[in-house]
Amino acid sequence: MLSGRHIVLGVSGGVAAYKAAYLARRLVESGAEVKAVMTPSAVEFLGPQTLAAICGVEPLLDLFGQSDVSPHTTLGRWADAVVIAPATAATLSRLANGLSEGALAATVLATDAPLLVAPAMHTEMWQHPATQRSVATLADDGCAFVGPVSGALAGGDVGLGRMAEPDDIVAALAGLLAGDLEGWHVLVSAGGTREPIDPVRYIGNRSSGKMGNALAVAAARRGAEVTLVTSATPPEVAGVRVVVVETAEQMATAVWSAAEHTDVAVLAAAVADFRPAGMAAGKLRRAEGPPQIVLEPTPDILAGVAAMEPRPFLVGFAAETGSLDAAVDKARRKGVDLLVGNDVSRTGSGFGTATNEVTLITPDGVTDAWPLLTKDEVADRLWDEVRRMRTERGDSR
């Protein structure tokens, strides 16, 4: 769920700050990209070099003296979520009152990403009316909380106020982000089409439908209503309406119908470009000699969706062998918002594999090559990118 996610980790000055290092490690191990922001007091408890080594980038410590003239807004736009762990009473008060004199508070004010807070303080401080007012204000503003929990506290005390464990914070964050596609109507196509030659044989390809299935499952898990048009074995998961097809003609009919009521269409199916002009009535037999098969083009499903007015946000796929130059040209010609190209001749990136190595291509030819990932990871990262692009455009459909 966190693979490819941009997570800002805020650390404020409490004894539990040492746990932020463990939390950063767990986030990175979950596949997230993590950038830390530390308050001046946090630096007294945890060295910035520790988080730099774990995250691969220096923590933001101050708003001034940076090469970026506005580091908090840059970080706020980059973030998919902000996690503050530990969050002290002073930090809760600053956030609740909109104070922005420090890098952490300013970053929180400069982002519209979800905020998850893990408080840590002594019991009396947690239960104080001032702290509870801050908590109530932040909750009203949409902030989510994880903890505090009961346990050993600094100074030998025991009680409510201990910071939640890093694994519990990671789980809470995954749950917080799980509904980020809620309200979306999503269409996914998957599998390879079969174009009949006779009642026995067909022209097809090696597509397993795994990539399309992963996209459908990830979207449903993240709150979208999903229609999956597929020629492959579909996943059995709640929230996915399945339409089973076999030929390109059937897939075109199903996709074009569903696309009229769709916010985002991701067409991952490997659709045949050509089909026999006519299907033989009976089985073609060896004794009759090699048949002469006349081919004709199949419907261009991607172009059909691109031509709709209005049309959904459109993502196409292009399976190539060798160079992706043809995919770059396809992204320009087809009228898509984004094209996902992959070289199926590369190890681990072909049909039927559990992994994929893809390159994102925009209509103006800008490319973003991703490393070899599982298809589940590719799916989540692709939805992250679609969500980011739609947000930047203010796309309401």
Image (cartoon, grey):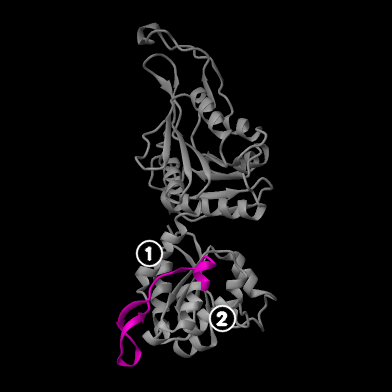
Residue 115 x %, y %: 51, 68
Mark 2: few/some/many CA within 10 Å (<14, 14-19, 20+):
some
Q: Secondary structure at mark 1?
A: helix
Q: Which residue is mark 2?
A: 94
Residue 237 x %, y %: 36, 42
Specify the amino acid type for callout 1.
Answer: Ala
- Residue 179 tag number: none
Q: Is residue 82 visible?
A: no
**Span shown in magenta:** 137-163
Q: Nearer the viewer, residue 371 or 325?
A: 371
Mark 1: few/some/many CA within 10 Å (<14, 14-19, 20+):
few
The quadrant of the picture occupied by the N terminus is bottom left
Residue drawn at point x = 61 percent, y = 51 percent: 390
Q: Nearer the viewer, residue 315 or 261?
A: 261
Q: Is residue 183 above or below residue 63?
A: above
Q: Which residue is mark 1?
A: 171
Badge 2 or badge 1: first in the primary sequence? 2
Specify the amino acid type for callout 2.
Answer: Arg
The quadrant of the picture occupied by the C terminus is top right
View extreme (bottom): residue? 155
Verify whether residue 283 appears in magenta.
Answer: no
Pointer 2 and pointer 1: residues touching (CB < 8 Å)? no
Verify whether residue 154 appears in magenta.
Answer: yes
Q: Nearer the viewer, residue 247 or 100?
A: 100
Q: Is residue 156 above or below residue 275?
A: below
Q: Quadrant of residue 336?
A: top right
Q: Is residue 390 above or below residue 108?
A: above
Q: Nearer the viewer, residue 108 or 131?
A: 131
Residue 91 x %, y %: 52, 81
Residue 65 x %, y %: 67, 84
* Label 2 – label 1 distance at C-alpha: 26 Å
